[in-house]
Amino acid sequence: MKHIHQLGKAAVLHDDRTLRFAKYSASVPTPPDTCNWAADVGAWRPLGNLTKSNCTAVMIAHQIQAMTEAELGAAALVSYRQTMKFYSATSGYIPGRPRTDRGAAMLTVMNRWRRVGMRGTGSRPIRRSTPRSRWRSVKQFGC
């Protein structure tokens, strides 16, 4: 199948403040051989990514779907509108203006998800470190 548009991941952005996994991995337990957090999710709905270069935003929407299904037993579904709004905020895409559909940089996407969340999905940033906020983080992300 031939793609009719570019893929949605823009060029890599580098930021020296970004955590490097290797620095912290020495104390991490050995992971299991297999793990499928999305086994019970069911169908993955396309959220614009068949015609737009928004795969980075769709990745966040599907991550929320998988995490909530695994933790709560019911997937929180992110809408097409929420996904496109998030994509616009991270990439500069303007609906109806195809030339602005250039994809988004993963660092930009992950930073926005961390700081702002994807509105209406229950995915919110933790604003301060308290025992309760740390507990909520562990419950939400399974860390």
Image (spheres, rainbow, N blue to C red):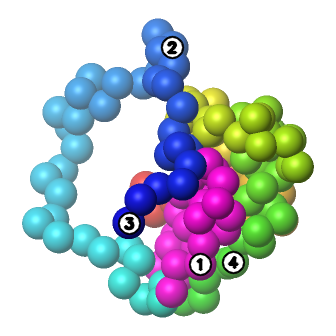
Residue located at (50% from left, 73% from top)? 66
- Tell me, for residue 77, which label it has, or none: 4
- Quadrant housing the C terminus: bottom left
Residue 85 percent coordinates (x, y): 83, 52
- Of callouts 3 and 1, which one flags the residue occurring earlier in the amino acid sequence? 3
**Vertical placement of residue 16 versus 125, above or below:** above
**Can residue 24 be seen here?**
no
Residue 141 percent coordinates (x, y): 52, 59
Residue 4 percent coordinates (x, y): 54, 54
- The residue type indicated by label 1 comes to Arg
Q: What residue is pinned by disc 2?
A: 15
- Of callouts 2 and 4, which one flags the residue occurring earlier in the amino acid sequence? 2
Q: What residue is pinned by disc 3?
A: 1
**Vertical placement of residue 22 versus 35, above or below:** above
Residue 59 part of the magenta-drawn span: yes
Element on which disc 4 rests: loop
Residue 133 percent coordinates (x, y): 68, 51
- The residue type indicated by label 3 comes to Met
- Of callouts 2 and 3, which one flags the residue occurring earlier in the amino acid sequence? 3
- The residue type indicated by label 4 comes to Leu
Q: Is the magenta stretch mostly helix, strand or loop?
A: helix
Q: Distance between the residues labelled 2 and 3?
A: 36 Å
Q: What residue is pinned by disc 1?
A: 45
Residue 84 part of the magenta-drawn span: no
- The residue type indicated by label 2 comes to Asp
Category of crowding for the residue at label 3, using alpha-carbon neighbours closer than 10 angstroms: few (below 14), some (14–19), many (at least 20):
few
Q: Which of marks 1 and 2 is in front?
A: 1
Q: Which of marks 2 and 3 is in front?
A: 3
Residue located at (51% from left, 14% from top)? 15
Category of crowding for the residue at label 1, using alpha-carbon neighbours closer than 10 angstroms: few (below 14), some (14–19), many (at least 20):
some
